[in-house]
Image (cartoon, helix red, strand yellow):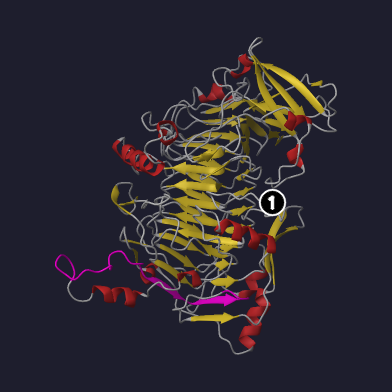
Amino acid sequence: MQIYVNEKAAPGGTGTEERPYQRISDAASIARPGDEVLVAPGVYRENVDPRNAGTADARIVYRSVRPLAAVITGAEPLSGWQPVAGHPGVWTARVGNGLFGSYNPYTTLVQGDWFMASFRAHTGDVFLNDKSMYEVTDLSGVYAPEEYRASWDRAFSVYTWHAAQDPETDETVFTANFHQKDPNAEKVEITVRENCFYPQKEGVGYITLSGFTVCKAATQWAPPTAYQEGMIGPHWSKGWIIEDCDISESKCSGISLGKYLQKDNDNKWLHEKYKDGTQTERECILEAQRDGWSKETVGSHIIRRCSIHDCGQTGIVGHLGGVFSVIEDNHIFRINNKQNLAGAEIGGIKMHAAIDVIIRRNHIHHCTRGLWLDWQAQGTRVTQNLFHDNTLPVLPEHPDEEEMAGMGEDIFVEVSHGPTLIDNNLLLSDRAFKAATQGFALVHNLIAGSLVSVGIGTDNGAKTLNSSRYTPYHVPHRTEVAGFMTFLHGDDRFCNNIFIQKPMRPALKAAMERCAAHPNCWDDCNVKTGTFPFDGYPTFAEWNRQFAGECGMGSAPSDRYYSHLPVWASGNLYLNGAQAWEKETEQLTDDTLPVTIAAVPKKEADGTEGWYLSTNLAEVLEKLAASGKKLPRTSVVSTETLGKAFEPEQRFENPDGTEIIFDADYFGRHRGTAPMPGPFAESGEISEKLV
């Protein structure tokens, strides 16, 4: 059945094409498996609560009949602004608190485990022409605003607002600095609702949301040890598809594939204090397993072809609930650019327990961090993505550093046992890959940034005592926990990559030096490119010799079970000063030919924007060949050649257990039997449009 919605329709509709509903929520209350909800262009100011689940064979589809023309928003317009005498550009307005119902975003503070409360932020926001302004904690920040130096948009950071409660009138009082703009002549809105398209009960699966603009929700901070909400989300169910949507301006997270509410373990670290957050994290994983977390009940979602941008914490967040999902062909940008929220849960994508998750063909840029895979990245594959400009902009006059989450990078894999597969990507930020983990493989990537936190960052940061983090690994391609272990480091593979050292920006170098001097730094602050941070790690042959002869009880004391695991490296190319691992033999290093590289936008003939490489890499490859320096060409890499990740004893393979042969490049084109390093099958592809 088709159910019609049009916000311009007369009241009392029945959902037919002739008499459509006015609200999407009306359709969501009756839609059944196999139904399609067709939504006409318009602005729908509501929190849609899908009441019924679809099935694997009969989904419930919510579709904007004109792409992006149906807007679901958590905001309401705010008019009736009055100028504040003596303060040019400053205006005030009042809202009765009855508008907010049981959830007032201007009395609700952003809070949760791993949130760094640098100031008292509320979950609500004020928007000027669809752009969120900057909250301040007192009126002086409205009357005399100063540029916020940490913001990626410093010029707009002086558009400030403040909210206070008037208990006598039960109103929220807004005061804002609009500078030369008249708020009564501009589009000014405030967030009113916590979510936009989100079932309030668990288990509402097999929903498709297609072609909507979704924006402006007063979402709460979403750590892994709490109920994780987003502006959009399946709320602990299975089989959602979110496609072709434009998603922006969530206070915290745009899309949540995250955890359900565990009443006995919801921000327990924040509220009860005594157990460390990593212990409550282990407890919530095992509680979820007891509560039925499995491949059959949760996950297997698809997020595709969405534009996700301008959210405060994450574009996509998830813990446990995102297992077996596919995130593909999305454009994710400007996440956490305001820098008013800080903590250890920030990134374009931030996922815990990304078991058998495929992240492919996404364009992720200008985020505080591009992709953060934390705990239990197992069977995860990150492939054919373009990452760039995901390192925090460092200004010479900016002394503040982000202590806990580091300086930002393209990919961060943390305290996971693998296998984690990263192949055919372009990693172009100053810091390309933060590797406080083990059990990963980097295959056929172009890497123009540093490897960070090699061999460190896996403890819990105690001042003087041992605080190793034990994290779980799982039965291959399942959620059941197979064991817990801390980190030996190593068990890593580097095959057929190109490493390019970019010129080191003085401001970045200075910031890294300050970062490294921090007394509780979990980050080695490396900005040099190449695999050399693994100098001192053993080859497999060296590691294996420890186990010659008698082992087990009664054998001579040995560190064999606690030493670094082996590293494998072959077929890599190091340019412009990038440095190889000391034990790599099948590689080519050249620092005689300068290389420049950056991702740049260009206008296409049809008016759209495309992204290309601005680089002389192709010419450098030609000069190397002409000089007699042969590129390393190994045989085609496959699941068989990569072996198994050590702790889970699982191969680098597809989620269905089949073998991967790396004979397709960044564009999906076929490689020959002696492939060149990097993500392109042929050097002629370097000049082609990337996305």
**Position of residue 109 measured from the top left corner of the image (x, y, whole percent):** 56, 29
Q: Is residue 272 above or below residue 646?
A: above
Residue 351 part of the magenta-drawn span: no
The residue at the point 51 percent across, 67 percent down is: 664
| Along the viewing direction, whichever of 496 and 85 lies nearer the viewer | 85
Q: Is residue 180 left or right of residue 600?
A: right
**Position of residue 440 measured from the top left corner of the image (x, y, whole percent):** 42, 62
Picture quadrant where residue 45 is located: top right
Residue 676 is at least partly visible in this image: no
The residue segment tinted magenta is 551-578
The residue at the point 55 percent across, 76 percent down is: 573
Secondary structure under tag 1 reads loop
**Position of residue 439 measured from the top left corner of the image (x, y, whole percent):** 39, 62
| Along the viewing direction, whichever of 571 and 432 lies nearer the viewer | 432
Q: Amino acid at mark 1?
A: His
**Position of residue 586 measured from the top left corner of the image (x, y, whole percent):** 47, 81
Residue 571 part of the magenta-drawn span: yes
- Residue bearing mark 1: 398
| Along the viewing direction, whichever of 358 and 561 lies nearer the viewer | 561
